[in-house]
Image: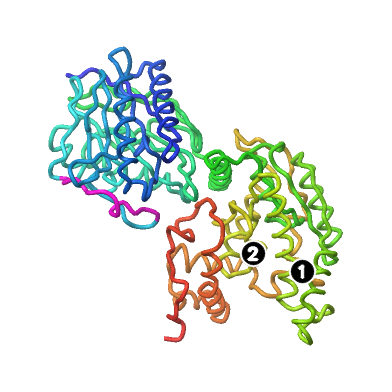
Amino acid sequence: MSNPLKLGMAQINPKVGDFAANERTLMQARAAAQNLGAELVLAGELALVGYPPEDLLARNAFIAAAEHTARKIAAQCDSDGPALLFGAPIREGEHLYNALLLADNGELRTAHKKCVLPNYGVFDEKRYFTPADPAEIAPLKWRDRNLGVLLCEDCWEKTPARNLAARNAQCLLVANASPYSENKHLRRRELMSARAKENKLGGVYVNLVGAQEDLVFDGSSFAVDDIGAELARLASFTEETALVTLAARAGRLVPLPADSAPAPSEDAARYAAVTLGVRDYFAKSGFTRALLGLSGGIDSAVVLALAVDALGAGNVRAFMLPSEYTSAESREDAAAVAAALNVSLHEMEIGAVRDAAEKTLAPVFGDDFNRAAPGLAEENLQSRIRGALLMTLANQSGDLLLATGNKSEFAVGYATLYGDTCGGYAPLKDIYKTQVYQLARWRNEERNYDARGADGEIFPPRVLTKPPSAELRPDQTDQDTLPPYEILDAVLHGLLERNRAPAELIDDYDPGVVFFVVERLRESEFKRRQAPPGPRVSVRAFGRDRRHPILDNFIEERL
């Protein structure tokens, strides 16, 4: 009978291509697990190189650096401490594999090569890796155990785990790089529980944490017993190393109950995901300070709160750039939000710049120019002046400008190109307008444990209740041009997240509204291609998930 296995779960945040940093992170996790009494440590998929490395995998120097660093790690994993299982790419002849490596007693060996390569949504692994043959999969023989080790998508299909069980695996140890999206943790647990029950094997699921450009990894690692019941759960959105003991039971190794972190609510998870996205984008790109335009509306207010929670108030600057259309209420609300977050608010009137630009344009505009009743070009000029001034401030200071548009606006083009879309990162890019309000209400009542902003109410009641407005002409509201956001977002959710055809939506919503949204969605693709990246939190975000041609002449509603 095998002895119990004391396993360290290393939920770490690697950096793509930073081999020295990733080596340190892995060795620190090993040391932390050793202090907890671990004899084996499991880290995430491609933990050595960061996920996803994309076309870096096609560079020989990158693969050579990964091999060199893996050997360095193995040399440090001597008999005085635990063995280390970690993800890395390996080359065998002409083939590149997504693999798990075992570093133990100063030696390095391949523990597993990934069989099932995902090639949907945000994943593109068939572009880079060769799949291993599931028929050849076998348990990792380590000391007196047969460990069934798998990589991420291998666990989403039945065959790899079944083959391991047939070859007398005693448990399932799964290393993952599974990005966050709404309720994704429930889907992971459902699948891991299914594999456990099918094969009567307990399992441990270790996920990466942290953000890489638009992808956010939430951690949320867990263990299940041989009937699929969850027995331990690590915290979401934070690095952590924990110990789980797998007890010997009838020739199998089954996790024992351990301390578990509570699962966050969806609003809490969504807010934490975006906060982590902002924090890691800055940390991994070398920026330390953010700036943004604060209008007095809900979107820029929530972006300010996210930036402060991610970076701290001392690393965020806010600017208000009013025109004569900016209401006194907007000035007051912007000041109130900035004060609640302990951020200094700087005001710069844009009237003189706008007047100078209009004077320059007047001879070309000719009779089309009408200051008393500005058209779209005159309205957008204000937004573009604001964008140019904010970008100049960012250039001068070395700060990163945050764009404040949301998913609803990006979807239907209600964001001025080279105005609202200016910035290096867009925190709300995958957050619908109605969800922005939800997050604001949640943040007024709660605060994530690692948020660096103030406690208490951040957003005054008026910010949550006044009609949204770009304030580019007198008495303007968003609903002058768009359907009410409750309807717009519902139609967009059907078209995007649920991938429903327009004809499937017209029984629930006005056909004119549905086809208006479809047309605006199609026409606005060129704007989205030029928009900054932002954290993915939905099941179908613009970019990696939804890849749509700019030049699209397929008009479905005319069929």
Residue 418 image label: 2
Q: In this view of the protein, which residue sits in the foreground, 19 or 432? A: 19
Kindly identify which residue carries mark 1.
472
Secondary structure, mark 2, is loop
The residue that appears at 53% across and 54% down in the rendered structure is 533
Spatial separation of the CA atoms under disc 1 and disc 2: 16 Å
* Residues drawn in magenta: 122-134
Quarter of the rendering occupied by the N terminus: top left
- Is 67 left or right of 36, judged from the image as shown? left
Residue 124 drawn in magenta: yes
The location of residue 529, given as percent across then percent down, is: 51, 64
Q: Classify mark 2: residues with Cα within 10 Å, few (<14), some (14-19) or many (20+).
A: some
Say which amino acid is labelled 2.
Tyr
The location of residue 182, given as percent across then percent down, is: 48, 51
The residue that appears at 46% across and 82% down in the rendered structure is 557
The residue that appears at 74% across and 53% down in the rendered structure is 294
Q: In this view of the protein, which residue sits in the foreground, 87 or 252? A: 87
The location of residue 130, given as percent across then percent down, is: 22, 49
Q: In this view of the protein, which residue sits in the foreground, 338 or 196? A: 338
Say which amino acid is labelled 1.
Leu
